[in-house]
Image: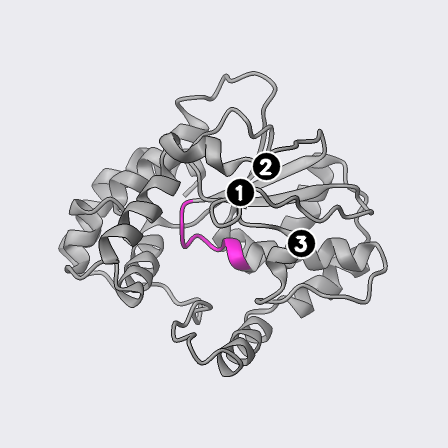
Amino acid sequence: MRRELLEFVQSNLTRKNRKNCVSNIQFSNDFYVVEFPKSGITWFTVLLANTFLANQGSRDKATFSSVRSYIPDLEANPNLQAFEFTCPQVRLYKSHSEFSADYVNIVYIARNPVDVMNSYYRYQKGMGSFDGSFEEFCFGSPFGIDAWRRHVNSWFVDNVNYANRFIHLVRYEDLVRETAGEIQQLAENFGWNIDADAITQAVDLSSRGAMREQEELARRRNPGYKFEFVSAGRSGTTDDELARRLEDMRKDECILLGY
């Protein structure tokens, strides 16, 4: 079981599986929210869904448990059609895939790779798909820093001149610090008419505290759910030698992403 889980997660990060990660029927108003795992995409998609729902006057809200009803995960459910928001009229999909020529409108969320490695390590340990040390995870596993670098380069270096592709970078740290401002800039870049009050409402509905409460409710109602997915948002702790090695390996990509 552990080996099967390992192969599933690894394949979803690489190009060999990307053809299985695109909805069967695509439209010009489809947008793909992409990340390397554990960069903040769950919170970000809840935030986006609540922004659009509030903007169109809906009394519904996206939660930890319901967000996939609005923004499906292409790795988990590749054949699902996304919910079509009405104001703006867009469909959103979530993906962890490396570059795919099938994705035209992309919102890429990046996070400091040291924090990504710490969070992803805790996640894989909790899932039982990795039982080595943090150092082994970072430098010797298919989930480590090389995978993160390959993911970033596939979107911003290797295919930078690919035609008819529009990409908007969101840094997780900026999103935490200036949540409403980052959503407003995203809306301006893609021409979405988003009311400021809708953004404010979405920020309140999608706070980390609210999402932790939502996950706790999901946990209470599902006896088989054991993992803590919504973390406290803390930065990981890394010893000096590991930090230096990670710094050396990630330098070019971090400069590219504005870190």
Q: Amino acid at mark 3?
A: Tyr
Q: Amino acid at mark 1?
A: Pro
Does residue 6 sit above or below 215 in this rendering?
Answer: above
The quarter of the image holding the C terminus is top left
Kindly state the secondary structure of the residue where label 2 is placed: loop
Q: Give residue 254's mark.
A: none
Question: Mark 1 vs mark 2: which is more N-terminal?
Answer: 2
Q: Nearer the viewer, mark 1 or mark 3?
A: 1
Amino acid type indicated by mark 2? Ser
Give the dominant element type of the magenta stretch: helix, strand or loop: loop
Q: Nearer the viewer, residue 256 or 89?
A: 89
The image shows a total of numbered marks equal to: 3
Q: Residue at x 79, y 60 (%)?
A: 54
Could one spot residue 179 in this view of the protein? no
Question: Distance of mark 1 from mark 2, alpha carbons?
Answer: 6 Å
In magenta, the rendered stretch is: 36-42
Question: In the rendered structure, are the residues bearing label 1 and label 2 in contact, judged by CB atoms less than 8 Å apart?
Answer: yes
The residue labelled by disc 2 is: 23
Q: CA distance from mark 3 to mark 2?
A: 14 Å
Image quarter of residue 154? top left
- Magenta stretch contains residue 13: no
Q: Where is mark 1, residue-wise?
A: 78
The residue lying toward the viewer, choosing from 75 and 34, is 75
Query: Hey, which quadrant is residue 218 in on the image?
Result: bottom right
Q: Residue at x 77, y 48 (%)?
A: 85
Of the residues under marks 1 and 3, which one precedes in the sequence? Answer: 3
Residue identifier under label 3: 70
Mark 2 surroundings: few (<14), some (14-19) or many (≥20) residues within 10 A: some
Q: Quadrant of residue 93?
A: top right
